[in-house]
Amino acid sequence: MSQAAALSHLMDAGIVGILPLGLKFIVDAFIGNYWIVLLSRLAFTAGFVLLTLSTPSVLSWESGLSFLTVDSPPPESEPFKRPQSDDSEENNRAGFFCSYQPQPRAERSLVKHILKRKHARSILFLVPISITFILLGVVSSIGNTFFIEQAVDMNHYVGSLWVPLLILPIFQHSYKKKKPLNCGIHPKLGIAFSMICAILSCITAAKVETRRLGVVTSQGVIDEPEKIIPMTMFWLLPQFALLGVSEAISEKNITDFFTNELALERNDDEATKASKRKHMEFLAQALSGVGMICGLVLVYIVRKATAANGGTSWFQNTLNTSRLDNYYWTLATLSAANLVFFLVVISVHHICSESRSVEDEQRSSSTVPLIA
């Protein structure tokens, strides 16, 4: 994977992370479930039509056949799907879209509900806290780009057994399925712990890259980027593991944090809680997507800054001539500063929330009529 291809993939991943939040807001505030399913169905169909038109003539009939055989709705429509009524014969005769019913507009807009029920000051305090979550997305972006590129030219053998490179990202993402990592941790503590794991991942990656560059220099293969380096790719396992733990913990705890701070009310039933939590999951994914795109911007800034005044850029045409270790140290420093900023802001937010709760209790008690 070239650096250009990896960064292009990163841009796509960032956009994919941001889009669901925007679509969910449009559904809730404006058009409702029915029309978003219709639009997604049309987009799904148009995508296969364009795929058929863009393929060579030899393969176009296969793409067209796959388009004709696809009968299920796009998976993105599942969050907007509502169960079909069993006692409605008219719905049974009406066809595919009758199982998708628009919600009443009064139930739709969670954003309006939040703005109405929450203090403007408490919402503004969440803005700097949310900014700290973006850097977690920046660190997460290096897992699918530079970490993979490091492993490409390293030794993939364990004895005589060849191990595919895919095992490293699979190991990284496997932590998201382990519930013990996400149980019994307060959201604020979980977020802080995920930031610590991100810092350790960057430090580990910097040290391993320094060692890899040392092996490259000692073997005299700096100008031979396609030559396999006599260093096992399993040196990269700790940085993948730490990044996987950071992603797994941050994903759930950021969602829990926003759910507790913005969405939930005491009288909400389980279905309402699940629906609101889904919105907060989209918000957490959007912040991660913004972080991935910011990772591209940071690479561009570092490239220009290190190449200024006749200097040597840390990002060269090949990995052997680049200085990814310096970039990793930069990310570790930014992440450490981000952790300190998060702890300060979250402490101020906690103090303000406590004082506001006391004021609300005093105000409510003062409005209770006296019984003669």
Image: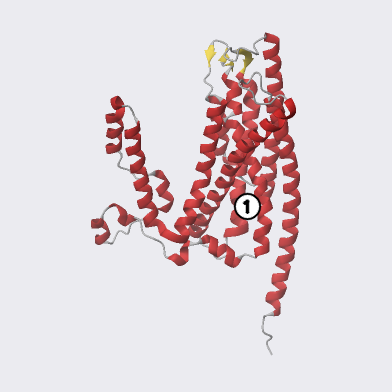
Determine whether 211 is above or below 184 in the image.
Answer: above
**Quarter of the figure with residue 250:** top right
Q: Is residue 295 above or below residue 3?
A: below
The local secondary structure at tag 1 comes to: helix
Q: Could you tell whether 104 is left or right of 340 in the image? A: left
Expressed as whole percent of the image width and height from the top left, the position of residue 246 reads: 64, 38
- Specify few, some or many for label 1: CA neighbours under 10 Å numbering under 14, 14-19, or 20 or more: some
- Expressed as whole percent of the image width and height from the top left, the position of residue 242 reads 65, 33
Q: Is residue 160 above or below residue 14?
A: above
Image point (65%, 13%), residue name: 222
On screen, residue 253 versus residue 62, left or right, reads: right
Q: Which colouring convention does the figure follow?
A: secondary structure
Residue at left 62%, top 31%?
241
Q: Is residue 205 visible?
A: yes
Give coordinates of residue 133: x percent, y percent. Answer: 64, 45
Query: What amino acid is at disc 1?
Result: Phe
The quadrant where residue 362 appears:
bottom right
Point out residue 89 in the picture as x, y percentages from the top left corner.
24, 60
> Where 301 falls versus 105 (above or below)?
above
Considering depth in this image, is 338 or 90 the residue closer to the camera?
Answer: 338
At 74% from the left edge and 39% from the top edge, which residue is drawn? Answer: 336
Viewer-closest of 158 and 7: 7
Task: Work out whether residue 10 or residue 237 is closer to the camera in this orientation and state it.
Answer: 10
Residue at the image point whose x is 69% and y is 23% from the top: 208
| Residue at numbered disc 1 | 257
